[in-house]
Image: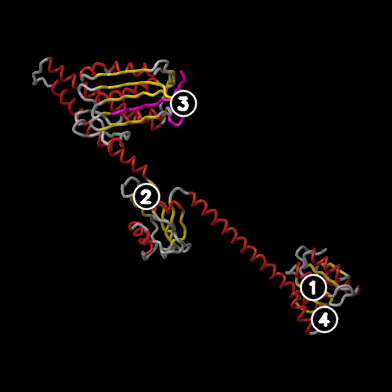
Amino acid sequence: MAKLDSPKVLVVDDEDLLRNGVKRLLEMEDFAVDVAATGTEGILLGINNEYDLAIIDLKMPDKDGMEVLKKIHAAKPNTVCFIATAFASYDTAIQATKLGADGYIPKPFSIEELLQQLQLGYKKRLLLLETERLRNDRENRLLEIAFERTRMNTIVNALEDGVLVVNKNGEAVLYNPSALKYLSLDKIVIEEFILPKLHIKIAAQINRYLSAKKYLPQSFSIQLPLNELNESFLQITCSPVPHPDGSLAGVVIVLKNITELKKIEQLKSQFVSMVSHELKAPVAAVYGYLKLLSDDSVQLTQAQKKKFVERSEFRLDALLKMVNDLLDISRMEMKIVQREIMELNIAEVVQSILEFFSLEMKELNLTVHFSVVENLFKVKADKEEMNRLFTNLISNAIKYNKNGGEIDVAIEQTENFVTVSIIDNGIGMKDEEKKKLFQEFFRAKNESTKEISGTGLGLSIVKRIVDSYSGKIEIESEFGKGTKVVVRLPLKSKVLKDHVENYVQA
């Protein structure tokens, strides 16, 4: 039995003695041998099996050796074939070589001559197989590289952040659609010198790597406004891309929209500013009153002491309200609002709030008109939130009104909503103030409002509450003529899950 690594040989010859003798001799030398007595049988074996070597007789009665050679070589180009003949000529040698023959084995031949030819042929066969394997490996690697590049492009194109890669010559080699948007470019041509098209500060960061005498391993980041109005901001991070030998291959630029982070920073700044203004003054005032009350060297009448205490209480009430407002916004942001959902008659909620403010409205000589449509449907909501919502709105209608002014409150059903309208003929707002109305800590500042206290958080809380019930709020205002607020709450209010972590159904 032949070994697994033994060369496999096909012998095609119509001479029985030669064919079988070659078979026995080669098997003694550890070859695996198949034989065919005709050209037709040789073609079938050569096409349907994998042979390392083939010895083909040139002259056979059914098909000559050239035809057998042609068919086998076409199907198995890596099989090394020899033509065996006693009638070799220059023309047949050329023809056989063109058809793929590796050489001639002249008849009669000795076993040594045959083995020498076959050994040379087998070495060639191994080289052919290795070449084919390397070619297949290369093609497979090219396919893997192409697939990897396609996958990388798909991933990069799907990123929300902008990505731009330039080589060490400053030429663009990779980018995604987000990069075009953030860089305000219509198109980027691969291998174009891209630096002149970039913002001067971005180009300067890239040049730090390209012009450096040695490889810079660190990344650099800058922040730039996305537009002239400074409403949106980008963070641009440049990082080096190294070659395996540690030299610079290029630079990758990542562009991230940080507008929301900037807004948070702005809110923090506003909060610090508000705290320093709104907290410092009242705390200092209360501290001053307490110092006077505790100083035995200062002679105060009972009326003065009472006045100081009342002023301290007023200041502390305002501070407590601001702290509560901040806590409310924090809970809404963290989505840990706890609600007790029940059916509420909004008219009863609004009426109780109007009664609560009746003394304050009387002091300002305000006239209130309250109208309610009969058979008003109830809404499902948390009572405390509805109280907070309409307390803020009615309180604003009072604070920003004028002495002797009017407030109209109307409640009705419109389609699937309960609509509450609150109209005053007070100070009103300017157009630029209306745009910032629901921003945290924003307060309209003019001659008419400078003496009015507040935290700038009330309407922000109102908007969050209305949104959490899938409601709507609209505000119309004209400076010097008054303000109209319209709140629409669904009759079958559905509390949004993303606004509420816990709620208890009553």
Decide if residue 358 is on the left or right side of residue 173: left
Nearer the observer: mark 1 or 3; the answer is: 3
Residue position marked by numbered label 4 in the rendering: 106
Which label sits in the foreground, 1 or 4? 1
Q: Quadrant of residue 109?
A: bottom right
Quadrant for the N terminus in the image: bottom right
**Which residue is outermost to the bottom?**
90
**Quick check: marks 2 and 4 in contact, CB under 8 Å?**
no
- Residue count near mark 3 (Cα–Cα under 10 Å), binned few <14, some 14–19, many ≥20: some
Alpha-carbon span between mark 1 and mark 2: 70 Å
With 38 as the anchor, is 145 left or right in this view? left
Tell me the CA gap for discs 2 and 4: 81 Å
- Tell which tag, 3 or 4, sits nearer the viewer: 3
Q: How many angstroms separate mark 3 from mark 4 (CA)?
A: 98 Å
Residue at 29% across / 31% down in the picture? Answer: 477
Identified by mark 3, the residue type is Lys
Q: Which residue is mark 1?
A: 69
Q: Is residue 231 above or below residue 402?
A: below
Looking at the rendered structure, the kind of residue marked 1 is Leu
